[in-house]
Image (cartoon, rainbow, N blue to C red):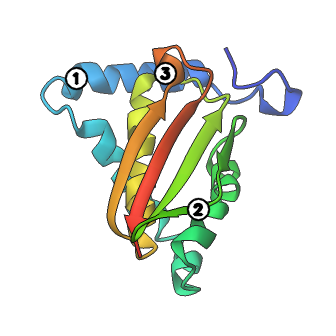
Amino acid sequence: GMFTSSHANRWYPVEYMREIYHAVDKAFGGKDPGLFYELGRHGVEVSIKGFLRFLARNLMSVEQLLKRTNAFWKNYHRGGEIQTSRVSKKGNRRILNVTIKGFNIARHACIELSGYIECLTRKAGAKDVKVAEKACIHKGDDVCSWIISWEE
C-alpha cells in the first residue's frame, strides 16, 4: 500500500495518512462538506510563507508557476507524479489540465488538492479561477485530473 514499489519511497506511511483523512472526515466532514477543499486552500497559505514565497517574489506568470508543479510535488510528496498540459486559450480564458498519477491516499486528499490548485493559481495573479475535476482514481479512473481555467 505504498505510493510506489521503489525502495526510496517505502518510508512514506500512506496507511497513516489515509487514517488521518478518514478520522477528520468522520469528526468534521459531515458538518462541513467544504472542509477538505478549505484545507487545500490553507495549505497554500502555509506553504506560501516558505517554499512558494520565492515564486511570488519573482512574479511568475500563472503558466510558469503551474509548469513547476512537479517540483512542488516532489518537495511535499514521495512517490506519484504531477503533469500539466500546455495552456490553451478559449476566448479571454486560459485552460490547463493537471494530472496526478500514483497518488492513492483517499478521496478527501483529491478534494483537498482541488482547493490547493485553485488557491495556488489565484496567488499567481489569475482572476476568476475555476477548478473542475475531470477524473479520480477513487471513482474508478486511472488517474486524478482537473481542468483549471482562469482569466489573466
Question: Which amino acid, by three-letter code, is at mark 2?
Answer: Val
Dividing the picture into quarters, in which one does residue 1 lie?
Answer: top right
Label for residue 114? Answer: none
How packed mark 3 is, by other alpha carbons closer than 10 Å (few <14, some 14-19, many 20 or more), is some
Secondary structure category for the residue under label 2: loop
Residue at image point 56% right, 18% down: 15
Q: Position of residue 72 (x, y in %)?
A: 63, 57
Q: Is residue 4 left or right of residue 112?
A: right
Residue 84 against residue 64 in the figure, above or below: above
Real-space CA distance between mark 3 and mark 2, rounded to the nearest whole angstrom? 33 Å
Dividing the picture into quarters, in which one does residue 78 lie?
Answer: top right
State if disc 2 and disc 3 touch (CB < 8 Å): no
Q: Is residue 113 left or right of residue 101?
A: left
Viewer-side residue, 107 vs 10: 107
Residue 66 against residue 40 in the figure, above or below: below
Label for residue 27? Answer: 1
> What residue does disc 2 label?
87
